[in-house]
Amino acid sequence: MGIWLINADVLAGSRFRISAFAETVATLGVLARLRSHRPGQLGHRPQQRWAAYEARMAGDPVGRAFVKNALLPTWLSDFLCAPPEEDELTFDQEMRRIREASAAALRADLAHDDPKLDVPDLPDRIAAVLDWVWTEAVEPDWERRRRAFEADIIARTGRLSSSGWASALDDMRPNMRWLGEGQLRINAYDYPPQDLTDGQLLFIPSTSTRGWVGWRRPHRYSVVYPCGGLLAEGATTAPGTLSRLVGPARATLLSLLNDPMSTTQLVSVTGFALGAVGNHLKVLLDAQLVRRRRSGRSVLYYRTADGDRLVHITG
């Protein structure tokens, strides 16, 4: 499925969406050591997360068989990729499609006919693995991740309004490109084009390194893509030397401006109040450590050369 055919109505109706379920699937791939680990994806103690996961899975042969047959190097089972429906707003709501599925339907969607998976309570056994990943590895850190996802969405919608779809989509995930004339290349595989006419397209940020695509044919499709926001533990905590020099809040904002960001993005990533962000940015502007420029309806802040040198020296 290398090319998706998307008309103007589909583009107009497409939107960004945050999915706790998609983030749980991304984290499962890392815990199972089947996907690359991004800094901060497992919190500030990743070795403890891996050890806890391995201990949990050691006594669960059905769970191990599920992971082995649902997450291959370049493939995910369809039931892990399916985009959320309008009324599926939480992790538990998205999990309904697995809890309510038949064991036969889930087995048919896995890579191999593993005899360990021939159990009548397979939906519950799969759900138990995903519930554990959500509860132990994602939910405790969900607010930080959600803020990063919101900031990424704000940045991409800003680029969309000012520069069009090519700018918003071209760097969204590896091998994905807006080709123009209603064609979105979603990967490099040589599959027949998929016509999305009358469908809805969702874009979902995650901490994954590559992302994936999913569908509930014929009307709902999704692209899960790597979030461009900062996710490393301490990403909103500036180096100590810089903090002592300009203050912790201003140091944090200055450290975040590797790429231009709006005040709304900075509020989403840091959790600081809007008024506080504005006041600190004014001080940094007066000190000529940042500058600002307008992009569409947003004002973006970025570091000056002096700001770059200060961050790099003190980092």
Image: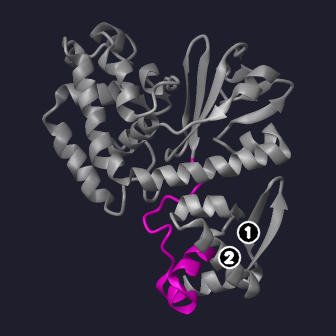
Separation of residues labelled 2 and 1 (CA atoms): 8 Å
Give, as a single range, the part of the protein colored magenta: 227-255
Q: Residues within 10 Å of mark 2 (few under 14, many from 20)?
A: many
**Rendered image quadrant of residue 96:** top left
Element carrying mark 1: strand
Residue at image x 33%, y 45%?
31
Residue 147: tell me if it is visible.
Answer: yes
Q: Are marks 2 and 1 in contact (CB under 8 Å)?
A: yes
Residue displayed at 45% across by 59% down: 39
Let me know if residue 229 is in the magenta part: yes
196 up-or-down from 15: above or below: above
Residue appearing at x 59%, y 19% in the figure: 220
Q: Which quadrant is the C terminus positioned in?
A: bottom right
Residue at image coords 51%, 22%: 85
Q: Amino acid at mark 2?
A: Leu
Above or below, 87 relative to 161: above
What residue occupies the far left of the structure in this picture? 59
